Amino acid sequence: MKDAPGTWRLDTHNGTLRAPVAPDHLGTAMLEPSGAFEAGSWQNFTLTYTAGLYGIDDSGSLRICFRFASDGTNPQFDDPKAPGYTTVEASNGAVLQVRFDPKGNVRPWDRTLWIKVVKGYLTEGDAITIRFGDTAQGSPGMRLQTFCEDSFEFRVLADPIATFNFQSLPEQPAIAIVSGPPDRYVGVIPTLRRPGKPFALKLKGEDRWGNPSDKCEITLGLRAHGPIGGLPKSVTLAPGAFAATVEGLIGTGDGDGWIELLAPDGASMARTNPIRFVADAETLHFWGDLHGQSEETIGNNSARSYFAFARDRAFVDACGHQGNDFQITGDFWDHLNALTAEFDAPGEFVALPGYEWSGNTSLGGDRNVYFPTEGRTIRRSSHALIEETDDIETDCATTGALFEAFVEAGETDVVMFAHCGGRYADIRQYHDGRIEKSVEVHSSWGSFEWLLHDAFDMGYRVGVVANSDGHKGRPGASYPGAGLFGAIGGLTCYLMERLDRPTLLDCLRCRRHYGTTGGPSGRMLLDVALDLGSETDLYSVDPAIFPGAVAAHGDIARMGDIVRFGEGRGRLRFDVSAASPVERVDIFNGKTLLATQRPYSENDLGNRIRLLWEGATYRGRFRQVIWDGGLKVNGTELKDYAEIAFLNRDKSIARDGNSLSWNSVTTGNQSGVDLWLKDQMGWIDFETGPLSTGIDLSQIGYEDTVFDISGELPRFLRVNRLPDENPHITFSGEAEIAVQGITDAPIWVRVALEDGTRAWSSPIYLCPTPEKQDREK
């Protein structure tokens, strides 16, 4: 539809104002070179803008914009030898003013090179030439974003009449960003299955940035460990394919197993996650990433490729798309519903319809919304970037209004999570247990255990999930790349009888799941059970919210159960199996740490010292803690070291004799280093921006030494001693749990693996009997 003369409208896809200037008169842009380029590679490009009929008037401007999620090198204009050096000139000698602003345009085209004519003007045919990554004076160029994109645009917007009304050129210069050669190989199998039932091994090569590579050319040997049958001796990954599948594997009996990937010379290259076979298993394990976005909102690549990546390249069992509601037009909402209906295949892959309610923090903050069926009403937080207003009456400005709208419409089958992304969910202000079932404690934005603590403080009974909240088009395998995101996107393991949409939603309502920080060791097996000693009432539905809830009866409680326990003692049992050695298991009652158990004893300790730094500055967007700095070992020899959870390839450790230096950022998550020392005689000088301290090695032992610099949120350095080698990839333990008082006792565990991977179980809620509450009152 054409605009009426003299009017303008917001074009939310292009991030511009649509105005009466005819598109053909805006000019043209040409990019050299063109074609496909490797993700994360160093390149240089020349973009030539040629003015159209209107030229560009004195004080008129160009904007060249890139998507929010891009982590490529930003343009800079001051150092010709440094990355990203960019030059700009006008063919007619007009004086230009240039600057880069990471938030200089309407989302998602935030990252903006702004070129303003400050003396003179351009006429039709005059040109402005921009050299991105100009290498003429020694710059290495500009590094491309670290993730793939079918059409990476250098989006050009013009303001030829100097009205500050920018319009998008009708044809945009673009390149393709593709994966590089394989840097590592990944194999994925289920984590819990019954013997005798077939399953598959799925494999891929990933480039150094975590992109599945279609440049693999290798035959991998396969070796089964444990009761795994039907495995061929090898599998070939061929050029052009992003993944391979080996069907027809089978468990030959109860027990744990895994598959080793071997190089052509027989050397071990990688191993899969563990799989456990249990003949009488009541539930199986299915893995999902239910939270991320595509290019139609603020992510990259299409929504169709988003679901296909989750299924075919990340190998997750369930996926949901969570676009910002204020960018989801009616047409895109219809398209998303069509996609989830198309991709949803019971028994093979679950695609959940839904969206992200993206309200301002003061109005409740970010929430995830999931529907059991397509065709539901999208109740947005606002229409901030949506032109059409025909459904604006369904908007819900606060989270409280959103809860009530669903309830009043009889849509209590909706399931919601609270999460922390750009905005954080203020569950102290708004929460409704009829609909909001879990909190997201980890994503690519960081770790947010404090959100679970908020729920405990308020007496809520919620589960724990972890997802990617990814914007790079890689749900289920969302690596941090080179941007400010300091974490790998998380995964959630759902304990279910079968894989289909109704069972998944019931699993979420009953909190029968646990979350992990994702990555190569993220698909660990975690079992948590509480032996109550005698039969009691076990609720999967919260009786405090649904008084008619029917209880089961039993003496064993599992993740998500709500238990009428009264008071007494129970015995908690946990079981972990992982691809990386287990470092510790922390057992909690709510926010209180009850015990830490490790798979080794004090007698096993060697001369390995572990230093882990962790935390965030505050709950909002700019929560990063910059731990740039280093350490020096004094009085003894540093024999070796290993990075822990340095997940961003731009953040690494360098060694100079007995000294280490690094760049490191945390956003609630953790990073660190292991030191293998000659002996325990001496000290460490630890120097970073947030914390500088001396560490007496003779005082570092089995228990943690903590240097606490917490503010609004926890920030600290934790130091302890480990065995020189830890072989424990499985670990089982138990602890006595004593319960008193008239408030809930949420019992849960947090697992830490040696490579920095973590997992959080959904709590078992021990709640007092009504008789006990009355007696105490």
Image (spheres, rainbow, N blue to C red):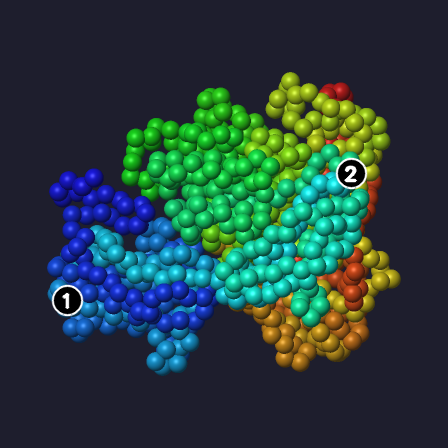
**Alpha-carbon neighbours of circle 2 within 10 Å: few (<14), some, or many (≥20)?**
some
* Other residues around mark 1 within 10 Å, as few (<14) / some (14–19) / many (≥20): some
Which sits in the foreground, 287 or 709?
287
Q: Nearer the viewer, residue 123 or 351?
A: 351
Vertical side of 763 occupied by 142: above or below: below
- Using the rendered image of the protein, determine whether residue 620 is visible from the camera's viewpoint: no
User: Which residue is identified by label 2?
Assistant: 279
- Name the front one of labels 2 and 1: 2
Residue 644, quarter of picture: bottom right
Whether residue 319 is visible, yes or no, is yes
On screen, residue 100 above or below 281:
below
Q: Quadrant of residue 142?
A: bottom left
Residue 568: x and y in percent read 82, 31
Q: Tell me the kind of residue under disc 2.
A: Ala
Quadrant where the N terminus sits is top left
Q: How many marks?
A: 2
State the residue at coordinates (80%, 54%): 599
Residue picked out by circle 1: 125
Percent of width and height locating residue 581 = 74, 58
**Among the 4 quarters of the image, the one containing residue 661:** bottom right
Lateral position of residue 671 relative to residue 725, left or right: left
User: Where does the C terminus fall, quadrant-wise?
Assistant: top right
401 over 209 or under it: above or below: above
- Residue drawn at point x = 18 percent, y = 57 percent: 26
Residue 609 x, y percent position in the rendering: 74, 66
Residue depicted at 71% across the width and 74% down the height:
640
Quick check: 176 left or right of 210? left
Element class at badge 2: loop
Q: Earlier in the sequence, mark 2 or mark 1?
A: 1
Say which mark, if any, is on residue 252: none
Question: How far, Cα to Cα, is label 2 from label 1?
Answer: 76 Å
x and y percentages locating residue 442 in the rendered image: 58, 48
